[in-house]
Image: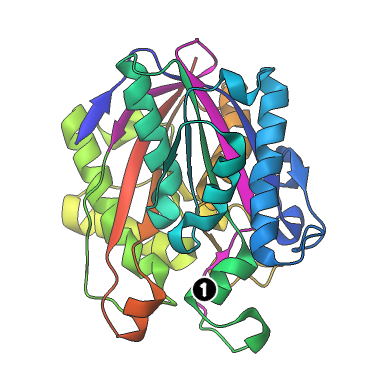
Amino acid sequence: MTFKYKNVYINDTATVIGPDEKKGPLNNYFDKSYDELYLNKKTFEQAEIKMIEDSLDILFSKIQKTRFDIDLFISGDLLNQITSSNYVASNLKIPYLGIYNACATSVEGLIIGANMLEKNQIKNCICNVSSHNATAEKQFRYPVEYGGPKPKTTTFTVTGAASAYLSNNPSNIKIESATIGRVIDMGINDVYNMGAVMAPACADTLYYHLIETKRDIDYYDLVLSGDLGKYGKRILINYMKTEYGIILKKYDDTATIIFDLNEQNVYAGGSGPACAPLVTYGYIFSKMRKKELKKVLLLATGALMSSTMVNQKMTIPAIAHAISLEAI
């Protein structure tokens, strides 16, 4: 399902990152960074809440607005019952939609906000996502303190939060169209191979986006997936060529951009809801504002699993959503 937008813009963004991301190649593109994972809080979960709050404070300062000026807050994270987002929303006192599509949550939020803005149901909104390496690894894999070895296909959850302010007021980044993806389950039950789990869903959404918009892959200056990691990235390239006859030339993946895979011990690259928007809002938007990129298709991918179902050896369904961004 694809939507076209005439008058929806991302007016500004705010990005905060953790210590590992700070050591990565994109450090200068983010608004704020932290030197440790606790952020002076008692628990990692409380630290994730603080990351969201910090990103919102930065965004409010940039757009020169307060919470009283915002019609809708859309947010999601990886914790059970999207706990981090819920606690922040309880303090904001803004009408709130809590959403979950795992690592595809960022684009899901942008689509919801864009659709409501296009229909003039709201005048503005803030879309936020967050992830924290210690909270996610503890919940979905082993306890952080366990120190168990992991296979090379494992991805490394990004610590960070990203917020975007959307409205009908023209700016230099326009949301041009979006495609809602389908849930795809290829029968994989390996929690350490998220790239293989999500790549087919990414391919499915990309294919239908091109079909429904009647576009060739070369329409875009960059097709950007997030976050498949270096192995999932290869799978997507091969899958698109084999299944659809589409050659991905101007393509990259946010999981392989946010870290230095040769120097940092992050396995196959980044993951988490914050990975794709951090790279996009920081690094990619910088290129778009310089007119180095004009048309970018962002495909956020998510593995729709739970620790309960993984322990029952169930297969892992996945989804991907696409959003077309244009530099104005």
Res 12 → quadrant: top right
Q: Position of residue 135 (x, y in %)?
A: 60, 67
Q: Is residue 157 magenta?
A: yes
Task: Point out the image quarter for the N terminus.
Answer: top left
Q: What's the residue at 46%, 31% (across, down)?
A: 95
Which residue is farthest top?
170
Residue for badge 1: 139
Q: Does the magenta stretch include residue 206?
A: no
Q: What's the residue at 60%, 21% (across, down)?
A: 68
Q: Where is residue 220 in the image (x, y as percent from the top left)?
A: 38, 31
| Residue 15 located left or right of residue 32 | left
Res 123 → quadrant: top left
Q: Position of residue 203 (x, y in %)?
A: 27, 52
| Residue 144 located left or right of residue 298 | right
Q: Can residue 246 be seen in this view?
A: no
| Residue 46 located left or right of residue 180 | right
Foreground pick, 134 / 223: 134
The amino acid marked with disc number 1 is Gln
Q: Where is residue 66 in the image (x, y as percent from the top left)?
A: 66, 22
| Residue 85 located left or right of residue 4 | right
Q: Give the range drawn in magenta.
A: 152-179
Res 58 → quadrant: top right
Q: Is the magenta stretch mostly helix, strand or loop?
A: strand
